[in-house]
Amino acid sequence: MDNVVLAYKALAAGIGMLALFGAGIGLGKVSASYVESVARNPQAKDDLRSAAMMGFAFTESVALMAMLIVLLIIYTI
């Protein structure tokens, strides 16, 4: 019975870690958009930086919440 529970925990943790792939793709898109925007309009670099940092923060918060949920699945249930 314990092996079955352990297998389901591993499966749930693996599925939960798929959210980190999405967060990585999101971070890549935010940084690519920032670089492209600065290349098109260098004078707006300071305004764009704050928006890009907000995008980084929101995307990274999704990754951290996914990691927290995965750790809770592994160590509590």
Image: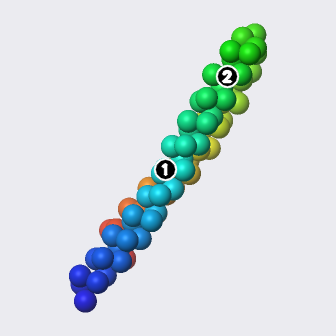
Looking at the image, which residue is at 61% across and 36% down?
Answer: 29
Q: Is residue 39 left or right of residue 27?
A: right
Which residue corresponds to the image point at 47% horizontal and 58% vertical from the top-left? 18
Determine whether 11 is above or below 35 in the image. below
Q: Relative to 26, does residue 66 appear above or below in the rendering?
A: below
Residue 35 x %, y %: 63, 22
Q: Secondary structure at mark 1?
A: helix
In which image quadrant can residue 17 be found? bottom left
Residue indicated by mark 1: 21
In this view, the residue in front, 15 or 47, is 15
- Quarter of the view holding residue 47: top right
Residue at the outermost top position? 43
Q: Quadrant of the N terminus?
A: bottom left
Q: Label 1 amino acid? A: Phe
The local crowd at label 2, few if under 14, some if 14 to 19, many if 20 or more residues have their Cα within 10 Å, is few
Reply above or below: 12 against 61: below
Between 55 and 41, the one lying in front of the other is 41
> In the image, residue 56 lies at what x, y percent?
59, 36
| Horizontal side of residue 62 vs 37, given as left or right | left
Tell me if residue 64 can be seen. no
Residue 72 on image: x %, y % = 40, 66
> Dot 2 corresponds to which residue?
36
Q: Residue at x 39, y 66 (%)?
A: 13
Query: Element type at marker 2?
Result: helix
Which three-letter amino acid code belongs to the residue tagged 2? Glu
User: Looking at the figure, which quarter contains the C terminus?
Assistant: bottom left
Instruction: Give the image's coloring scheme.
Output: rainbow
Q: Earlier in the sequence, mark 2 or mark 1?
A: 1
